[in-house]
Image (spheres, rainbow, N blue to C red):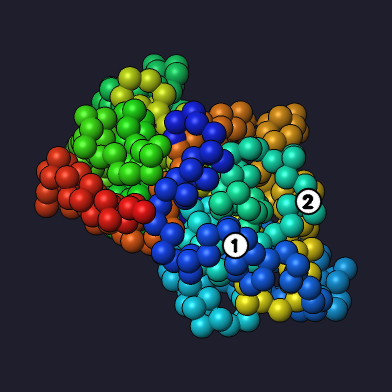
Amino acid sequence: MRRIPLIGGRPLLGIAVCAALTLSLTACGGDDDGGSQGGGGTESLEGRGPITFVTGKDRSGNLKKQVDAWNADHPDEQVRIIELPDEPNEQRQQMIQNATTKSDAYSVLNLDVVWTAEFAANRWLAELPEDEIDLSKMLPATVGTGQYRDRLYAVPSTSDAGMLYYRKDLLDEAGISQPPKTYDEMWDACDKVKKLPEGEDADCYFTEVNKTESMTISAVEAIASAGGSVIGEDGKPALDTPQAKQGVEFLVDAKEKHMPEEAVTLDTEGGRRHFQSGKLVFQRQWPYQYALANEDDGSSEVAGEFAVAPLPGPGGPGVANLGGHNLAISAFAGNKASSLDFIRYMTSEKAQRANLLATSQAPTIAALYDDPEMVKKFPYLPVLKQAITTAEPRPVAVKYGDVTAAVQGEMYDAVTGKKSAEQALTDLQAKLQPLTTQ
């Protein structure tokens, strides 16, 4: 996903490794050495020839350009793109279906960063030779997302972190010179904007609260911004806290009082269209929207009228969720040597620079965030780099599908009023307990 469609200030690598080790490893087939499980390990990365690249939908057209350039230089190692649906849950299910049948139809997988532990533990990925991939130029937080049990299974391709998009033109008109740092400042700014003729019909705020992966992301951000966590550092659910309750009550209150009426039916793209139509004052969104919302071809009503800031929180800046995508090799793919070379090509600084220019997706190469040319074109890059550095990951779990389904269900019940925030958290704590028990 641009998410396509990751906090706390703790190093992600440490969290990922520790959390993964504390979680249930029943899917690992009983092998406890953390070795070459998904397809024989690095020694089996052999074979050259045509491969497939399995990914979510690319609306920019840049992916095809990059693959076409590869194909022009590698006539005997042609890459065919296989596009999956927009929704991450559907992407994950199709990849799992391919893996469980041990099909060789998928070669290189474009994985959401949070799937690494699940896919590696189930032996669906080939281990990658870390000494043959230059990870030193990448943001440390992104490198950790490709590792499982201290081994490398995926290479960071794009990163992601939520930011606050806001209508700078409307805030300026209302006499507000700075974006909000707290929720109360955001609501106060909305009240002032809605008194303007240009803002009276606009909705105040939107973050995704539909029953999809995006709900897990919204919950992680809200709880982390209040100082809590879905899963504690000990790998156990940590939802029986005042901080978790404060975070969920923010989502409930925001959905009830400040979001569009159709909020529970809007996905990432729906939220983007709502913002670009001029109907939102504030929006939590990924970096990919920046380029699309600034298009001057008539597709955006807010081109040149918005800006980006860190997410607000209860008493100061909030915490973003660490997102992004990593490239991995299916354990069952043929031509793994070609697949590895293609991954190196797609994650190179040259390729990431071109992708940033074409799509505004967050790179994983640290130097691009400080490049004067890039910052001039994408002024949000310093904000984004800080957000990624301090971001909170979604729960790192071998049984991630079950974990996120539980979070989505209970949080949806809370924001739709079926349960109180307190009851939803109590029920979620109980559901997550067996999923995170050794």
- How many residues crowd around disc 2 within 10 Å: few (fewer than 14), some, or many (20 or more)? few
The C terminus lies in which quarter of the figure? bottom left
Which element is circle 2 on? Answer: helix
Query: Circle 2 is placed at which residue position?
Result: 131
Q: Which residue appears at 41% of the width and 24% of the height?
A: 317
**Which residue is found at the position 36% from the left and 34% from the top?**
224
Residue 68 place in picture, x, y as percent: 77, 68
Closer to us: 98 or 2: 98
Q: Residue 136, located in which quarter of the rendered image? A: top right
Residue 177 location (% of width, % of height): 45, 16
Tell whether 367 sits left or right of 195. right
Q: Is residue 234 depicted above or below 1 in this figure?
A: above
Mark 2 or mark 1, which is nearer to you? 2
Instruction: In this rendered view, identify the residue nearer to me: 7 or 10.
Output: 10
Label 1 CA crowd tier, 10 Å (few <14, some 14–19, many 20+): many
Question: Tag 2: residue type?
Answer: Asp
In the rendered view, does 274 fall on the left or right side of 33?
Answer: left
- For disc 1, the marked residue is 110
Which element carries disc 1, helix, strand or loop?
strand
Asked whether the viewer can see residue 48, the reply is yes
Towards the viewer: 25 or 148? 25
Residue 205 location (% of width, % of height): 32, 38
Q: Earlier in the sequence, mark 2 or mark 1?
A: 1
Question: At which x and y percent is residue 267?
Answer: 37, 56
Task: Tell me which amino acid carries mark 1.
Answer: Asn
